């Protein structure tokens, strides 16, 4: 087995056991990136020299017993909206070109404190606004399964890097599905945690009440271990949850195949007695037949393993897209007001004494079309004449969505739904039809509105050989139940690695 094929946990175990070094693992991923980056373009900044130095430091720390983390020495990537001291952080926008933060995001720091090695920054939709990683000022990322197709977004670079074997795991952010949807399209696993579970300090905000940092890995166990390192109170983040609200890595990994106390496969144990609801509206018109079939098949297999699986309804599904885009755009309009060309980032040429003209030119030239579209929408819904008609109503819908989830989770442990209504679309298709792109978020935005955890994992392939992802949704701070259900789904599905190697077009060191 090649080093770049290993899961993050398996790689970490081999590094701690002395079978390979962190430096060897990092060099293997850098070599892999050299082979595939021309096709995939997952990274916007790859710092091999810095990563090798960090790997050598990790190797010393492991030898000296300074790390007890299962991911010490493991090479990971970071989405380009998470600040990294001494490394560019641009949100893939011209307006932040050449910006190098003087501090590191707390989520990144927790990984490096545990001995993980940062390879570089991954491509994303500009300011996380998009679903295909095509709005980046650096150009689009391509799906490793089929480079004529999009990887999803906005964390498409992180998901593509993991899928292509360029890193063992990655960090992303999720405002309305930006981890789960690209994870589905790229055939990897990703989780958006409960709002407040992971520090947002150092995350450049899009929608402050919606954004959440989360991990991306090759399987559920990788994501569980990564999230175990990330969760916890951070006094630097006012939205961070109070102490005691968080679960632990042990609870996340309780049903992993190697952790079963009974000696049986952990996933099979996990399914017994699990109460699963399927929101029927998430399987309605607009959901591709192959995606619907995957959900039905997963439901039947979970039933056969001892889970209770029933249809259910939130009753508000038709309102979540308009409510989400009103709230998210309003928050984007406020958050992006600070980028004016004065303090940092891109500045247009300034005529003498023409400060307001410089603001206008800097923002007009610095922001891309999709970002401008959402700023304009957000400014409109916050204006005096329309605040009550749009923004206030959206907040009321959000409260009702939270109440609807509360009622549903009185009966079910988790909900099972698609992570996206379709598999990966051809490059350019979503840019030509923004409304279709917005409607494609139907399966994911509800948990962002409610602040709940949601996980995407690969189930199988559609008729075109593209990955189909399942989404598992849980109640607040019940990531342990989400992971339990995910381990059950993995057991019901069977091994994914050989499908990834055979159908993902990576076994020969190239993309499809």
Image (cartoon, rainbow, N blue to C red):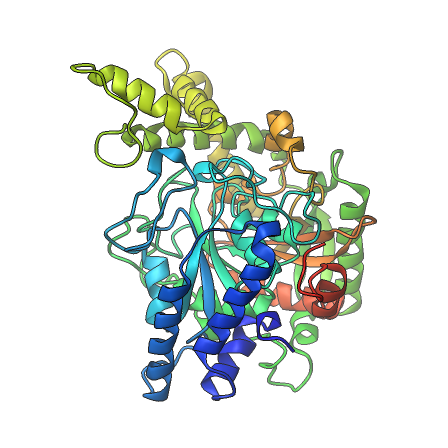
- Image position of 165 with respect to 446: above or below: below
In-image side of 413 versus 306 (left or right): left
208 and 183: which is toward the camera: 183
Residue in the picture at 62% in, 40% down? 314
Taking the image as shown, residue 406 lies to the left or right of residue 347, namely: right
Which quarter of the picture shows residue 37?
bottom right
Q: Residue at (67%, 75%) from the top-left corner? A: 269
167 sits left or right of 92 in the view: right
Quadrant of the snapshot with the N terminus: bottom right
Count the marks: how many?
A: 0
Does residue 241 appear left or right of residue 247 in this picture? left
**72, 282: nearer the viewer:** 72
**On-image quarter of the C terminus:** bottom right
> Percent position (x, y) of residue 177?
55, 44
Q: Residue 371: image x %, image y %?
A: 45, 29
The answer to whether residue 345 is above or below residue 107 is: above
The residue lying toward the viewer, choosing from 405 and 60, is: 60
Q: Is residue 403 above or below residue 307?
A: above
In the rendered image, residue 102, in percent from the top left (x then y), is placed at 23, 51
Q: Residue at x 50, y 83 (%)?
A: 20
Picture quadrant of residue 358: top left
Spot the residue most to the top: 385
The answer to whether residue 409 is seen in the rendering is no
Of 452 and 237, nearer the camera is 237
Q: In the image, what residue occupies the spot 34% across and 49% down?
A: 88
In the rendered image, the residue lying farthest to the left is: 353
Q: Position of residue 231 (x, y in %)?
A: 39, 62
Q: Is residue 459 visible?
A: yes
């Amino acid at each position: 087995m090649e080093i770049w094929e290993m899961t993050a946990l398996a790689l970490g175990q081999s590094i701690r056991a002395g079978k390979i070094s962190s430096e060897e693992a990092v060099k293997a991923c850098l070599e892999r990136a050299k082979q595939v980056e021309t096709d995939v373009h997952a990274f916007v900044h790859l710092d091999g020299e810095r990563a090798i130095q960090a790997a050598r430091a990790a190797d010393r720390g492991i030898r000296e017993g300074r790390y007890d983390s299962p991911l010490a020495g493991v090479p990971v990537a970071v989405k380009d909206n998470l600040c990294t001291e001494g490394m560019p952080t641009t949100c893939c926008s011209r307006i932040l070109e050449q910006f190098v933060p003087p501090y590191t995001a707390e989520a990144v720091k927790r990984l490096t404190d545990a001995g993980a090695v940062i390879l570089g920054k991954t491509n994303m939709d500009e300011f996380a606004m998009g679903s295909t990683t095509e709005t980046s000022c650096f150009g689009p990322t391509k799906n490793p399964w089929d480079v004529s197709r999009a990887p999803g977004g906005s964390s498409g670079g992180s998901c593509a890097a993991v899928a292509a074997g360029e890193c063992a795991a990655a960090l992303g952010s999720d405002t309305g599905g930006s981890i789960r949807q690209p994870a589905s399209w790229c055939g990897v696993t990703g989780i958006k945690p409960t709002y407040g579970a992971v520090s947002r300090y150092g995350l450049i905000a899009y929608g402050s009440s919606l954004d959440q940092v989360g991990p991306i890995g090759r399987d559920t166990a990788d994501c569980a271990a990564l999230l175990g390192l990330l969760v916890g109170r951070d006094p630097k983040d006012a939205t961070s949850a109070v102490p005691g609200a968080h679960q632990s890595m042990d609870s996340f990994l309780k049903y992993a195949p190697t952790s079963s106390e009974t000696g049986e496969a952990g996933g099979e144990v996990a399914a017994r007695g699990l109460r699963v609801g399927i929101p029927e509206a998430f399987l309605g018109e607009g959901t591709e037949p192959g995606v619907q079939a995957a959900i039905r098949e997963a439901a039947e297999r979970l039933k056969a393993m001892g889970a209770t699986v029933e249809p259910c309804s939130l009753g508000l599904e038709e309102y979540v897209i308009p409510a989400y885009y009103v709230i998210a755009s309003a928050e984007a309009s406020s958050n992006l007001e600070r980028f004016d060309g004065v303090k940092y980032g891109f500045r247009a040429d300034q005529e003498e004494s023409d400060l307001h003209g410089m603001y206008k030119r800097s923002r007009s030239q610095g922001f891309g079309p999709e970002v401008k579209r959402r700023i304009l929408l957000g400014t409109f819904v916050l204006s005096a004449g329309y605040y009550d008609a749009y923004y206030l109503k959206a907040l009321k819908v959000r409260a009702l969505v939270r109440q609807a989830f509360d009622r549903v989770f009185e009966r079910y442990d988790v909900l099972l739904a698609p992570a996206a209504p379709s598999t990966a679309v051809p490059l350019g298709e979503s840019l030509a039809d923004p409304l279709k792109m917005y409607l494609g978020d139907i399966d994911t935005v509800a948990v962002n509105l409610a602040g709940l955890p949601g996980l995407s994992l690969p189930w199988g392939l559609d008729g075109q050989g593209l990955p189909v992802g399942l989404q598992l949704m849980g109640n607040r701070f019940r990531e342990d139940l989400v992971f339990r259900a995910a381990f059950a789904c993995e057991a019901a599905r069977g091994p994914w690695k050989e499908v990834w190697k055979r159908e993902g077009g990576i076994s020969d060191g190239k993309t499809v």
